[in-house]
């Protein structure tokens, strides 16, 4: 497995990885459409046509490099990546190798390249065939990039300090009057505002790691982020914190998709691979293995 990223990046994981963890929120997997294809959060079927299926034969895909599937990711952090992306450990690392296998690529044929979140969602030509970095499917982003069928739906979690005044919070009302951190320009901001309105002071941060540092220092009282990321943050990176619940969803379910260049010839085939993994139970197995948020209750 080839990796085009400096090994030294691993040392930056605890804060930088969380700081760059920008992209998502959602709950579980793709819902099957009535015709057997997958359906996005916006209700669009991604089932490949017969012509699409014909181009998905192993070895026939128009990848950036013949015989290689180039995958973009940013700094690795749990539960999405355990160690380097090439480890195969972590939800998205394991997902990529499962998708690659469906597309006819061996593990050694997967090459990882380090990119920023801005590179992933911008309209610029991509240095990867697909990217796996917890990117929420939105209509705004669809104008700039392609998405695969969704592979996960998630929720927004609320994290507090174990020794703080709100360690026992079990409802939205319990947190009224507090300072709540969110990551600016991400789903956490909209969901927190919808949940509390003016009952809390929303404090935006450039990255989740900055917010978690503020939480542990007492600058804010709670931090909102993707619940699975929050579980990892509170158990791996900031062990004196806990996820006390999730916020009510706003609008369509938040779903994550693999990102491809706009109008990529690979989109239908990658979606077909994700649909297959949903149908055969692989996505459920990955969720059970790597994610640990199902038992976290909603705050109401």
Image: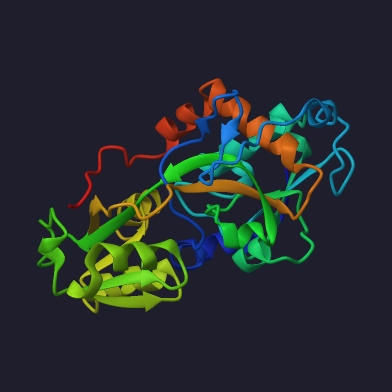
Q: Can residue 212 be seen in this view?
A: yes
Q: Where is residue 232 in the image (x, y as percent from the top left)?
A: 37, 51
Quarter of the rendering containing residue 197? bottom left
- Drawn side of residue 105 relative to residue 219, left or right: right
Residue drawn at 25 percent across, 43 percent down: 296
Give left or right: position of 232 versus 85.
Answer: left
Instruction: Please name the residue shown 39% across and 73% down the image.
Output: 210
Instruction: Choose between 111 and 145: the one closer to the eye.
Output: 145
Residue 20 position, x and y percent, is 52, 66
Q: Is residue 276 above or below residue 253?
A: above
- Which corner quadrant of the image does residue 239 belong to? bottom left
Residue 149: % across, % down = 60, 39
Q: In which quadrant is the N terminus drawn?
A: top right
Residue 74 in sight in this render: no
Farthest top residue in view: 280
Residue located at (70% from left, 27% from top): 102
Q: Where is 295 relative to 255, above or below?
A: above
- Residue appearing at x 55%, y 56% in the figure: 138
């Amino acid at each position: 497995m080839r990796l085009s990223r400096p090994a030294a990046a691993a040392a930056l994981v605890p804060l930088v990885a969380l700081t760059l963890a920008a992209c998502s929120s959602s709950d579980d997997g793709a819902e099957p459409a009535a015709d057997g294809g997958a359906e996005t959060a916006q209700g669009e079927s991604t089932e490949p046509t017969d012509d699409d299926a014909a181009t998905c034969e192993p070895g026939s895909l128009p990848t950036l490099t013949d015989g290689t599937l180039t995958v973009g990711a940013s700094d690795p952090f749990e539960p999405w990546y355990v160690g380097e992306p090439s480890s195969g450990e972590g939800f998205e690392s394991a997902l990529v190798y499962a998708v690659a296998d469906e597309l006819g690529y061996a593990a050694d044929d997967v090459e990882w390249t380090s990119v920023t979140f801005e590179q992933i969602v911008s309209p610029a030509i991509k240095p990867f065939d697909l990217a796996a970095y917890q990117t929420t499917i939105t209509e705004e982003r669809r104008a700039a990039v392609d998405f695969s069928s969704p592979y996960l739906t998630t929720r927004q979690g609320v994290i507090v300090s174990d020794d703080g005044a709100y360690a026992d919070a079990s409802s939205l009302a319990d947190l009224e009057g507090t300072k709540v951190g969110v990551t600016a320009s991400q789903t956490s901001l909209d969901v927190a505002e919808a949940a509390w309105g003016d009952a809390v002071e929303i404090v935006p941060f450039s990255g989740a790691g900055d917010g978690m540092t503020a939480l542990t220092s007492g600058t804010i009282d709670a931090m909102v982020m993707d619940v699975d990321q929050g579980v990892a943050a509170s158990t791996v990176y900031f062990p004196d914190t806990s996820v006390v619940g999730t916020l009510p969803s706003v609008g369509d379910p938040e779903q994550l998709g693999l990102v491809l260049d706009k109008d990529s010839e690979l989109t239908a085939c990658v979606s077909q691979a994700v649909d297959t993994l949903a149908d055969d139970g692989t996505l459920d197995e990955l969720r059970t293995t790597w994610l640990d948020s199902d038992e976290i209750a909603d705050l109401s």
